[in-house]
Image (cartoon, rainbow, N blue to C red):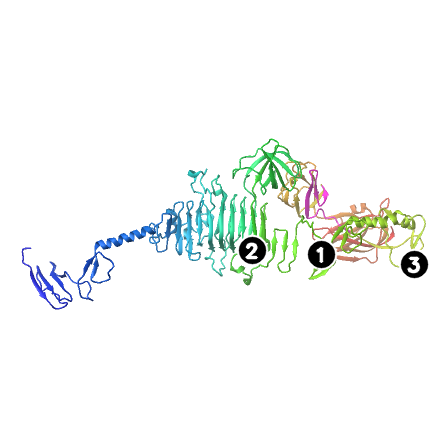
Amino acid sequence: MSAEIIHKGSGVLGNAPLPTDLELQELAVNYNAGDPALYLKDSAGAIRRVGGKASTSAAGAVQLTNALDSTSELVAPTAKALKEVNDKHEAFKDALRYAKRLYVDKDGSDTNNGSSPAEPLLTLRKAIELAQPGTAIMLGAGEYTETCPMQVRRNVGIFGDALRQVTIRPTEATKYDGIFEVDSGFYCYGCTFTGHQQGTHNGVYKTSWVVRFNTAANNVPIGANALGAYITRSPYIQNCTSLTARQNDGQGGSTSTGVTGGGLLIDGSACAGNSPLRSMVVDSFTQINLGGPGCLIKNDGFAQLVSFFSTFCEYHVKCETGGQASISSSTSNFGTYSLVADGFSPSPIFTGTVQGATTSFINVVNLSAPRIGSTARPLPGLLLRIGTSFYTVTGSVALTDGNSGYRVNFYPSLTGAVPNGTTVEFVRRSQISTGGHNMEYVGAGTNYSALPENGGIPIPANEIVETNRGRVFFISFDHLGNLRVGKGFDVDGASGDVTITTGQFNLAGLNAIGPFKRNGIFYGEQLQEVSNNTTLLSGFSGTADGNTVPTQNAVKTYVDNKFQTALINGENIKTLVSGTGQANVLGSGSVNFKTINGQTLIGSGDMVIAGGGGGGGSAIFRSTVTFSTSDGSPATMAVTHNSTSSYLIGGDTNPTLTLFRGRTYTLNVNALGHPFRIKTTRSTGQGDMYTTGVTNNGTDVGTITFVVPQSAPDTLYYQCEFHPSMGGTINIANEGDTVGTVNLPRSGMLLSVQSTKAGWFRLYNRAAASTADATRVRTEDPAPGSGVLVETIATGTDTIRLSPAPMISNLESPVTDVYSYRFKNDGTAGSAAITLNYLVLEA
């Protein structure tokens, strides 16, 4: 600073020095009032302006200030003023921050703390990681592609800006892994879920669900006895949509095919063993999972589903292994099935021991600790299992005889005794109950091709599916307005016709029924009484009115009193035509002679028909006889039981069955508590079972199918597992001749043979002739005197007229009216009806 500073000046507006105008340590001053400024030359040779206005649009000098309310270009804020602005901004953000809220937005960043709308997070997954119990996550509009599954802590809620503006989808790598795994108190509102899939990933077949319980949740510190969800408040999904498809997101018009992800999985086994609840709640939730499942409830899980809609799903709601659901105000659209209930809980809820039993109730003591819940009580709706038989509990009351236990009522009644000490089990059946459920085009398909305008055809049987003792209790309307109340009451929406299909419908209290309508026209009378009055008069009016029908007993008694007693027992007709004398019946036409009430109308004397018989003491009658050939046991047989004494098969008691090798037989068994077993010996227990070709051998309620193999032995047996008297013989035979007998006159003329099946018919004059003719082939004529009266070959349903008519006569000793026959069935399996038309020469 030793050199003297030299000043140079200019009064010209805007005039500034050049680098050649100044030396180092020289100053130049422009003193013009329009733009005053000071210039100097730096050590690099550049001219620097020291003072003056920042803007060239107006005259004046720049002023520094702490006040921020000026808009003048001549005023600039100081650092202090700027700090005050920053402090106020931070205070504003602090005011927006909320300790129990996290904000997520597509303009955010996961480096933010997410505590205010001014500093949102970018991903939902980051917000879930930061969320603590009680946190609400506010999700801004946009599509979020997240690494899944996202495990959500207890009592965390997720709130989307708007249902159709907030979309959550898994990444491509995690599309098979599910979206949310949740715990108690979870809540989700206003979100659409898409892109979740079903298929094989890394060698494992998976189904991706929108929401399921978190099996890894650690709730041990708050009382859980193991890992898993510990539900004290049911997870709640409200105003959300699951929209996914195999090839696309399932938008309108999609014809995507193949299975895809599902909506809700409510698996009770994913909860800690002592979890107070195993349930979820839904309100206004829509599932459009093209080809994928809707809501699956299993392993004693429970769901309360309100305004729950399903479109194009494999099923709407399915309960299995003891899962149960309560549904209201909901609709199933298209898809494969609507409501499915299958089976019961995989292990007993609790067990007990029988101490006294009748057919309608049992006393149960020594009840075990319940597997779920806190009390072992046989409540209505549980299933009581005794051995392999199941009964529905209808009620229970505590025992009052000093024992700790319950008297349990159930349906249906027992059919046999239950010994004291028998262990019984109580299980929870899979069950759905719903009222006012809409069924629209169920079964028509799982994409938009199922729409009626695209040719979709609904399958009514797919609306309600009950298997393996699962139950669905429902009231429903379909797309045609047809009303169904359970499986026994139907109202046709178009005609108003009501159909009741139940064996226990009670009409007590009705004053009248009818008249009935056919094709819109009323026919018949109004019925007001069914009377057992043997005078055929109304018990109400005492007259033969047009509103009363008699019982079968009343009609029979009336006829017996009026006709049989007066005519037969009074010997009137019997005396007229019986005895050793001759009776004449005059006139043309036909006369039928029958046996009435055990009284023979024609005795040992002769009968002459005037003008047509002759006087030799004989008469000629033309008649027919129709009989069915034996074809063994029927292809389908109903098997019931008579207590513990016998099986009833086709109404017969322990009958001998004849089955043919190569044929298939179906036995529909309804013998609760009496397992029906096909065996090689008549023995109780489960040993000596014959299993070749037999399906479901040993069921007590179900279907047994027996495809008889060619290797089957000639004799088998059927036997109850528990009761020696319940059983019989099964004869196994090869397809071939059917041998039988038919009643014909001792002598006569055979006019025609009619058969309902193709086959070879042979009639013999004695049984020995039938036996001797067994090996002859049809291309070989019978030998003279061999006893073959007639043989015919029918190629279908034929009537073969015999001309000239051959004589038939019985050569048994003594002579009878029983003739032997053989029939070789050339048609389909089953008996043939044979009709013989003949003239009687000697009765």
Secondary-structure class at tag 1: loop
- Whether residue 712 is visible here, answered yes or no, is yes
State the residue lying farthest toward the bottom. 12
Please tell me whether residue 823 belongs to the stretch shown in magenta.
no
Whether residue 594 sits left or right of residue 413 in the image: it is right
What segment is highlighted magenta in the picture? 627-653
Q: Amino acid at mark 3?
A: Gly
- Whether residue 786 is visible here, answered yes or no, is no
> Disc 2 designates what residue?
438
Please tell me whether residue 638 belongs to the stretch shown in magenta.
yes
> x, y (%) of residue 784?
83, 51
> x, y (%) of residue 511?
71, 53
Which quarter of the rendering shows the N terminus?
Answer: bottom left
Give neighbour class at mark 1: few <14, some 14-19, many 20+ (Cα, 10 Å): few
Dot 1 or dot 3: first in sequence order is 1
Residue 611 disc label: 3
